[in-house]
Amino acid sequence: MSFSSGSSAGEGDPEVGFAKLQGEDFEYYMQTYSIILGRNSKRAEVDVDLTSLGGGMSISRKHARIFYDFSRRRFALEVLGKNGCLVEGVLHVPGTAPVKLDSQDLLQIGDKKFYFLLPSRSLFASVAAPRSQVAVPKPMPQSGRLVSRGEERIFWRGDGDEEERGEEEEEGVSKRLRRDSRDVGTSEKIATKSMKRSRANREADNYKLTLLEEKDVLSSVASVLSDRCRPGEWMPVAKLHTEMVERYGNIWHHGKVRRYLTSEDLPQRETEGTPWFGLSMLLRKYPEHFAINTRSKGSAITEFVSLLSLIS
């Protein structure tokens, strides 16, 4: 995660993130799949403290959550605070379904207004998009301007989500099929190639998203182990699982919770009733970062984990 004042220009490498929140006097880069907006308290801190940014006293401790919905492949906003949130001028209150977020949507929480922006390039590309792809944000209601960070900027698009682009690709395929209706063989070849290309692109995107999700989980595990253990110490995987549930059970997307904190997506005969089975299997995939050890006492087998190196 990255948070900075919009009045300062960045130097060196541009900031990167899955999405960006842009206000008149601040910008925030999402570098995890889920963030909480609200106000800090003595008991807990949130990712974006809107009270410190002039959001007023109507903001709850946990007022809203912005997250990536893996099942629908889009970002969404879940309202948690009793005073609700405005998305493009429409009030949404707690208890309603999460609101789909498009690039350049104007959000208001309390007295704070800001834009939700998506990158003009792929989430996984390592270079900035050409300047011809820049989408100019809509003007803020108040005076002022949206501030960019430095000369080498990451530009943010306003052309909707991946699902909409997929529909445009399918519409393009249909048009080509109609033009070539006199030659059925040619049409079938075009359709087959387009479907294969679309399928390959989806599979590649899903693979990259899986790797990013695994890295996010591993970073969270490393954070817990760093807080609870000294270098070289071991923690029971069952205790690690309890810590992970307490810290991230209500923050992570429910799909990620099922995969790594409940093992509900795995066959019961494999998990043997251990809710941390998925988490344990993930840690075993990365022996360069985590060591797993087992100890037997009678018929009982206990797993332990130790952090070998931090996740870069």
Image (cartoon, grey):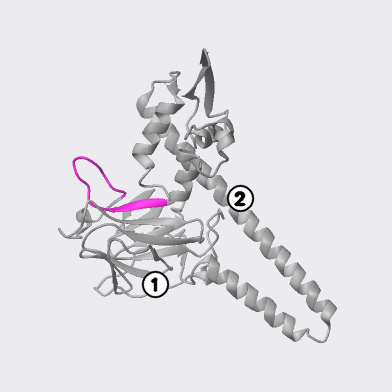
Residue density around tag 2, few if under 14, some if 14–19, many if 20 or more, within 10 Å: few
Q: Give whichever of 100, 55 is nearer the camera.
A: 100
Going by the numbered disc 1, the residue's amino acid type is: Pro
Q: Residue at x 40, y 51 (%)?
A: 34
Residue 282 spot, x, y in % from top left? 55, 35
Q: Which of the two labelled residues, at mark 1 and mark 2, occupies the earlier sequence position?
A: 1
Is 84 covered by the magenta stretch? no
Q: How far apart are the alpha carbons under marks 1 and 2?
A: 31 Å
In the drawing, does residue 148 fall left or right of residue 206? Answer: left
Which is the main secondary structure of the residues drawn in magenta?
A: loop
Residue at 47%, 35% (x, y): give it. Answer: 275
Q: Residue furthest left?
A: 57
At 37% from the left edge and 47% from the top edge, which residue is drawn? 251
Label 2 sits on residue: 207
- Secondary element type, mark 2: helix
Q: Is 35 within the magenta? A: yes
Question: Of the residues tagged 1 and 2, which is closer to the observer?
Answer: 2
Closer to the camera in the image, 150 or 201: 201
Check disc 1 and report the residue beneath it. 137
Report crowding for label 1: few under 14, some 14 to 19, many 20 or more residues within 10 A (C-alpha): some
Based on the displayed image, in which of its 4 quarters is residue 100 positioned? bottom left
Res. 9 visible in picture:
no
Q: Position of residue 51 (x, y in %)?
A: 20, 55
For numbered disc 1, what is the local secondary structure? loop
The magenta stretch is: 34-47
Tell me the amino acid under the disc marked 2.
Tyr
Q: Is residue 171 left or right of residue 161?
A: right
Q: Nearer the viewer, residue 169 or 155?
A: 169
**Is 42 placed above or below 161 here?**
above
Residue 66 at what x, y percent from top left? 37, 57
- Return the x and y of residue 94 as percentages of the image width and height: 28, 61
In the rendered image, which quarter is residue 93 located in?
A: bottom left
